[in-house]
Image: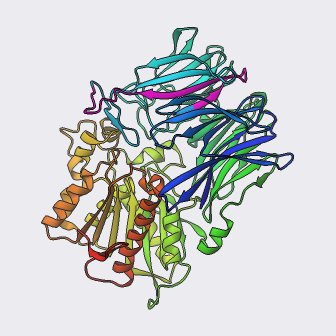
Amino acid sequence: MAYPSDPEISRDGRLIAYTLTRVDMKGNKYENTIVLDDLVTGARKFIDNASMARLSPSGKKLAFVRQVADGKTAELWVAFTDTTSARRLAEFKEVISLEWNQDDRRLLLAGTKRNDDEDYFYHDGIPYRFDKVGFTDSAKVVLSVHDSESGAKLEEIARDFILIPYWQIATWHGDGILLNAPRSENPYERIDILLYKNGKTETIFSDCAYNAIDSDGKRILLHGKEHAKTHTEHRYLHILEGGSVKPVTEQLVYDNLLGKLGEAGRVYFVSAREGRQTLEVVEPNGNPRILVSHDSWVTSFDVSLDGKVVLTMEKPEEPAEVYVFDGELKQYTNYNAEVLKRLSPSKANHFQYESFDGKKLDGWFIKPARMPEGNAKSPVVLMVHGGPKGMYGYNFNMTAQILAGRGYTIVYTNPRGSDGYDEEFASAVLLKTGLEDFKDIMSGLDSALARNHDADPKLIGITGISYGGYMTNWAITQSDRFRAAISENGISYWFTSYAFSDIGLWFDRELIGHEPLKDDNFRTLSPLFHAEKVNTPLLLIHSLEDYRCPLDQSLMFYNVLKDLGKEAYLLVFKKGAHGHSREGLPRHRAKRYKAIIEFFNQKLVEQSAGFKLITERSGPVQSH
């Protein structure tokens, strides 16, 4: 498949640019190409080995990042949009973000500098590592300003604060630079917002839960809250102007995922709404309006000064494509049409159900594309999302589609704790994870089975990643209904997660208990201490470089289960961070799909004893 992402639109609404990622299975790598389109003439240009496309305010220039062949450094380039003639400006070890100033000339680039000793990492603070980033090695965030005309580096600013993955570090504010400086005590909820200008630094907010994400030189768009007590709280948009903060979306209930300042005082944003990710706008008079609310997920967007929006959007039966909204939504690309003809994705069917306490919840099921050979009814796979503040719904789920294509009925739900509803719903699992949320999931399974008479209630598997991996581990200690389980990058012991995970020192304390050394929750809510109850064959999949739910979580559970004489198998990928299912190398991801298919096939379809992992080199081998 081909995956468009990170769209940009010129201020006059004429040009769009985005990164198109394709898979090279032979080379076991991803190839990035920037696509530059003229919406008026239809002309299309390509820039190979390039990503992070950024159109200048005039639309005459395009900045981008190009990876050097050794994979260890990246280069900053600038091209003219009319010819795509490009020049290299500088080389860096790491580029995190890139942004044009309003003057159409200066570029703000964010990266990091580390100790880089060949023999050791050194730390004197926490956190000492982050998933996907690795050991921080006393890293410093480094901002640099570059002149796109002369190619000169105009300024370099080093700041001694930690780098958080997926976190906006800095943005222009007129001729100043706004910096989001997270505190190590809890970097997602304790942040200092600083303004750097003319060699001086001013504190805009101290110890807040805001993140400055956009500015037009006068207004600053803030994402978050002034203060937050837990990670489950929703993040809303606010405007800082003239020294006062004005709420923009707080009254709208739903969690905001993205936001941008638009034309004439408008604010555009994406919300998580009951299984959807919608594109919305708040008008200058404060009135909200939903622009795109299909059964879909808007995953990224940009807006022009005439109110035109370019966005990427995915649906249950279609991975992300580029769309343009200009009063009405139009699909602009269709990269995966031919692949989807062969895959023939199945429809996601929504249903509502009541849990044990009468709470109404959302669930979905996907019917099998065909029945497994020799089976009168289809086996069932129950899927659990990550988080717990994750969300299922109207997005493209490759694992679900592959299994449905091979004859499985797929069931997934949004139990309490999920995103997409109000804050109270998201916080309902705090200090009781695995209890009511587990009952919600099981009630959803029962409701889905009642609606699918062709599904076999005696042949049920369960799987999930991260919190979904935890819930898989937990489920088989609480129920014997499952004939097979696949836990990916999950938790088995909350205390070691608190002590070892990159976010454990704050995330696990909020979720499980405030005093890990004393709180019984860290033991009673851990699957490891209920291992003797497991009667379900379990495949544990983990990635070696996962620092979010570290490898020890699966290793401990596997060892204890084996010691108890239980049926367990361990598959450890040598590379890949916590998100290895989405971001692992192509062959890694293909082998993961293959292992999932084989395990469920042998346990639910063939109902085989043991498990043999089929390898490409040596054929069937007994898994560990």
Look at the picture and state if 230 lies above or below 381: above
Seen from the viewer's position, the closer of residues 597 and 359 is: 597
Query: Looking at the picture, how far across and down is residue 162, in whole percent?
Result: 40, 28
Q: Nearer the viewer, residue 290 or 72?
A: 72
Q: Quadrant of residue 618?
A: bottom left
The answer to which image quadrant residue 295 occupies is bottom right
Name which quarter of the figure residue 131 lies in. Answer: top left
**Vertical relation: 136 (above or below) 418:** above
Determine whether 580 is above or below 219 in the image.
Answer: below
Residue furthest out toward the right: 41
Q: Is residue 21 left or right of residue 167?
A: right
Say which residue appears at 56% left-offset and 20% top-offset.
Answer: 178
- Residue displayed at 32% across by 76% down: 483
Q: Is residue 586 left or right of residue 215?
A: left
Q: Position of residue 379 (x, y in %)?
A: 43, 79
Quarter of the figure with the N terminus: bottom right
Answer yes or no: is residue 356 visible.
Answer: no
- Relative to 343, is 514 above or below? above
Q: Is residue 539 magenta?
A: no
Where is residue 317 drawn, in percent x and y?
Answer: 62, 66
Q: Is residue 73 visible?
A: yes
| Quadrant of the snapshot with the C terminus | bottom left
Farthest left residue in view: 563
- Residue 114 inside the magenta-drawn segment: yes
Q: Which residues are magenta?
A: 98-123
Q: Position of residue 343 (x, y in %)?
A: 59, 72
Query: Image check: 15 left or right of 256?
Result: right
